[in-house]
Image: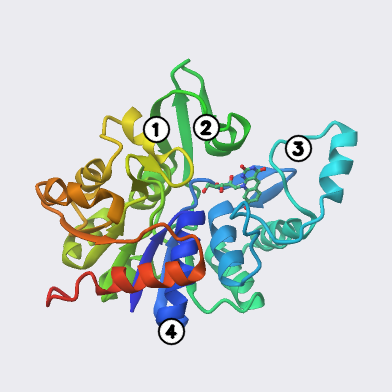
Amino acid sequence: MITALAGGVGAARLLEGMVEVVDAATITAVVNVGDDTRLHGLHISPDLDTVLYTLAGLSDRGTGWGLAGESWTVMAELERLGGETWFRLGDRDLATHCYRTHRLDQGATLSEVTAELARARGVQVRLLPVSDDPVRTHLRLASGHEVPFQEYFVRLRHDVAVAAVRFAGADQARPAPGVLEAVDDAEVVVVCPSNPVVSIGPVVAVPGLLDHLRRRRDVVVAVSPIVAGAAIKGPAARLMAESGFEPSVVGVARWYAPWVSTLVVDRADEALAPAVEAEGVRCVVADTVMSDVRRAAELSRAVLGALGDGRR
Ligand code: FO1
């Protein structure tokens, strides 16, 4: 059994490769909900949808999020009405948010709705939101103004200085059913190459997760989302620096060291392997840039083999 801690696009790509290497039904993905938002009265779960659409083979390969071959009729009409259109919801994608919101209004939990959506899309990986309770990432900007995650990420194009990050609701949130067991029972826990601050941060902020991960540290393997000092996608390097961590594989190792035993870094960072190990984290070098499914499958093989020296 494999458990993956997942954010959005980077996690989706790794999981897409992983299902080429192992039986999808043996994988549980515990997914960030800190990016979730409500717009037009709809509950949107971007990371769950990115993972789901990618595993269903339906994702837009260019953006990494949303559905391939989308049409934008609803957005165009909303624009005519003077509605909010900065967060682009395609016509087909909207069906997912309508379904989810309706089921939540009927009293279903986010886990239940996610399982229904996965079944409808033929996805065999078990997708678990980290919590059924609201956990929402908020960023305090250097200006002192606080914004919810999507305002920062999409509206402000993450091109603003951040003074602090908080996960609203995390203190009271309970792990969704099956999440702690998935950590406890996994042969390997994979931390996907997602943003350590705003994708993995909200996952491990849910009470219980860190304790269980610390106990399983020997089998926790992370893939660095930072390659040669820069994030493959998004604001990971910048947010790490703003959080006081060097934006490099060494900074990632330091960030994760309390609960991760092994870090997979890109060949471009091979020379930093001793510095990673000086943080108390074993370093494995591989090609981590997943430009296609074949490379994602190869990376998955390296990640799943990273503990293959008797530590499992
Ligand atoms: N990202 C954007 O940069 N612009 C968008 O308009 C946008 C819309 C969107 C709609 C649905 C969805 O599931 C994701 C969407 N994303 C968009 C991506 C999303 O903001 C980020 O990928 C994640 O939240 C970060 O992991």
Q: Is residue 188 above or below residue 205?
A: below
Q: Is residue 123 visible?
A: yes
Q: Position of residue 171 (x, y in %)?
A: 36, 44
SS class, disc 2: loop
Q: Residue, x 54% and y 63% (percent of image)?
A: 51
State the SS at label 4: loop
Q: Which residue is depicted at the point 80% across and 55% down?
A: 91
Which residue is denoted by mark 4 in the rendering? 23
Q: CA distance from mark 1 to mark 4?
A: 36 Å
- Give the x, y percent position of residue 70: 77, 57
Q: CA distance from mark 2 to mark 4?
A: 37 Å
* Residue type indicated by callout 2: His
Counting labels gives: 4
**Picture quarter with the N terminus:** bottom left
Residue 158's label in the rendered image is 2
Q: Single out the mark in the foreground, 3 or 1.
A: 1
Looking at the rendered image, the disc whose residue lies closer to the viewer, 2 or 3, is: 2
Mark 1 Cα within 10 Å, few/some/many (few <14, many 20+)? some
243 relative to 290, above or below: above
- The residue at which mark 1 appears reads as 238
